[in-house]
């Protein structure tokens, strides 16, 4: 599989997912602060989802930069990974529409967990296909344990009480900080 084609396709899907999410933001019913505050659940869900998509898009780019060969397995894993990514706008809107409901947050956290696991599987496959390629800097035990335990905690909490999104927001902010300050790396052309 041509690496550039799969990257271009992935970039297009990421752009479409982010665009769909922003289209779900509605103008407040009333032109005052109260009307704007009324829309906070959807806006908060959008901020969380956009942050995660942006972080992962950056990491996906770095993941494919190290690959010279893209196998059919990587192609298929990337497709399943994209499937879970395209569900994020749906779950974002669902969480935003029902901020006091546990089920939307549970499925949102589950989708993010499966999406994250597939990214790690894809990194392992790329390393398998390209033995000289280094592992992704985010594919460390410390980083992944924090991410997975945080998402599992969000799953458990959201099943009991609708605060899973706040846990996911904290995870997003920490991961963004790690990506920017702890593991700086340059994107190559």
Image (cartoon, grey):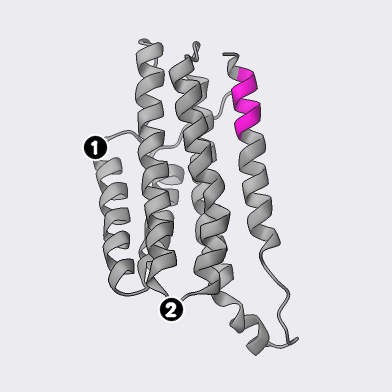
* Image quarter of residue 97: bottom right
Q: Which residue in the protein does label 1 denote? A: 141
Vertical placement of residue 149 versus 137, above or below: below
10 left or right, relative to 74 = right
Q: Position of residue 65 (x, y in %)?
A: 52, 21
Residue for point 70% across, 60% down: 23
Q: Is residue 135 visible?
A: no
* CA–CA distance in space, label 2 to label 1: 34 Å
User: For the residue carrying disc 1, how many other residues have a C-alpha within 10 Å: few (<14), some (14-19), or many (20+)?
Assistant: few
Vertical placement of residue 147 versus 185, above or below: below
Q: Which residue in the protein does label 2 denote? A: 100
- As helix, strand or loop, the secondary structure at mark 2 comes to loop
Q: Nearer the viewer, residue 5 or 34?
A: 5
The span shown in magenta is 4-10
- As helix, strand or loop, the secondary structure at mark 1 comes to helix
179 left or right, relative to 93 = left
Q: Between label 2 and label 1, give the one nearer the viewer.
A: 2
Total labels: the figure holds 2
Q: Position of residue 40 (x, y in %)?
A: 57, 76
Q: Quadrant of the N terminus?
A: top right
Residue for point 62% across, 48% down: 17
Q: Position of residue 16 (x, y in %)?
A: 67, 45
Residue 9 covered by magenta stretch? yes
User: For the residue carrying disc 2, how many other residues have a C-alpha within 10 Å: few (<14), some (14-19), or many (20+)?
Assistant: some
Vertical placement of residue 134 versus 51, above or below: above
């Amino acid at each position: 599989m041509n690496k550039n084609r799969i990257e271009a396709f992935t970039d297009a899907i990421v752009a479409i997912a982010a665009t769909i999410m922003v289209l779900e933001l509605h103008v407040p019913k009333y032109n005052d602060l109260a009307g704007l505050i009324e829309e906070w659940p959807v806006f908060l869900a959008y901020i969380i989802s956009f942050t995660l998509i942006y972080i992962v898009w950056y990491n996906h780019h770095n993941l494919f930069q190290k690959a010279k060969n893209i196998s059919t397995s990587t192609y298929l894993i990337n497709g399943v990974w994209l499937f879970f990514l395209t569900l994020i706008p749906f779950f974002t809107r669902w969480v935003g529409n029902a901020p006091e409901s546990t089920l939307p947050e549970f499925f949102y956290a589950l989708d993010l967990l499966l999406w994250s696991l597939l990214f790690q599987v894809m990194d392992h496959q790329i390393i398998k296909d390209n033995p000289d390629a280094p592992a992704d800097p985010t594919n460390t035990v410390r980083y992944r344990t924090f991410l997975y335990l945080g998402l599992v905690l969000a799953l458990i909490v959201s099943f009991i009480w609708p605060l899973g999104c706040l846990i996911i927001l904290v995870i997003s902010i920490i991961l963004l900080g790690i990506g920017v300050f702890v593991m700086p790396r340059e994107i190559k052309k």
